[in-house]
Amino acid sequence: MANPSEHYILATGGKDLERLRLLHQVYGSGTESMFHRVGLSKGLRVLEVGCGSGNIACWVAEQVGPGGSVVAIDNSPGQIEQARKQAQSRGLRNIEFQVADAYSPRLPEGSFDLAYCRLVLMHLTDPGAGLRAMRSLVKPGGKVACEEMDLGHWLCDPPTTALTRFFELNKALGKRRGENFQLGASLHRLFREVGFGRPEVGANFTLALRGEQKHVLGLTFIEFAPELVREGITTQAEADQVASELMKLADDETTMFGFPLVVQVWGTR
């Protein structure tokens, strides 16, 4: 997903399948709606940067059909292995997975109709470089579309200290590492900075009272909590307490989660 030298804070490969499955439950329908607004259609050649276990790439491959194609990259060999298994299980032959990072995709410039990423730029210390690389890979008139979180915008009703602390700790870890976990709000400006004259915007914001998808926040915290402790941002005792409370809240149907806002931005080269 990021540069190999930038240690990703979450699990990868088979260890991450459940969290990514639930994350796609939360944001998948909004992502699909954005693709339709951007103009995804049969026959297009599409790139996904930071494909994870392949949930979006496989769906896109189905949409572009046999006359189109998808190339999906991730810097984790474990993620690529899982993505290939998913594509094979779905009988998809118009999709190719490669191990590569967002800064150096090692693909021919101007060879795609559409390039896409979700929750990738926010994990880069130089998101502009990642976006410029994506722009260089689409044809003149081609499009780049990105979805990035803004951890400053979320809901929980009734309010809880555990969820507030979850986001405080997550943002603190991003700041410590030079990553911007509130990139979504300024993503449109980043598009302009790299050369997109008139970017378009949308929002991917989901509410839930019940359902397994509510567990995605707890699972996410459990994955990055060891990094918090290593960095001295919190203690193991507090991390255990927050994780436990998040899981309890996920099972409480009287508590509404508004998952972190994901801002959608797309532009034409």
Image (cartoon, helix red, strand yellow):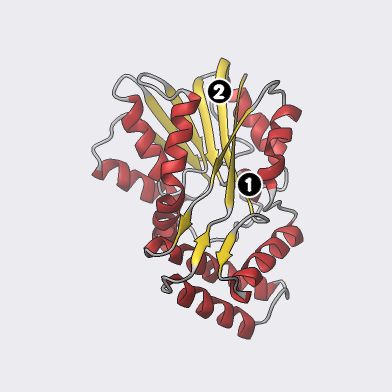
Q: Which mark is residue 3?
A: 1
Q: What residue is rendered at 68% in x and 56% in y?
A: 152
Q: Nearer the viewer, mark 1 or mark 2?
A: 2
Image coordinates of residue 5 in percent, x first then y, are: 66, 52
Look at the image and tell me in which quarter the C terminus lies: top right
Give the alpha-carbon distance from disc 1 to disc 2, as whole Å. 23 Å
Q: Would you say 157 lies left or right of 251 here?
A: right
Q: Would you say 22 lies left or right of 149 here?
A: left
Q: Which mark is residue 143?
A: 2
Q: Would you say 137 lies left or right of 79 here?
A: right
Q: Is residue 120 above or below residue 217?
A: above
The amino acid beneath tag 1 is: Asn
Whether residue 98 is visible to the viewer of this picture, yes or no, is no
The amino acid beneath tag 2 is: Lys
Image coordinates of residue 209 in percent, x first then y, are: 43, 63
Q: What residue is rendered at 70% in x and 36% in y?
A: 129
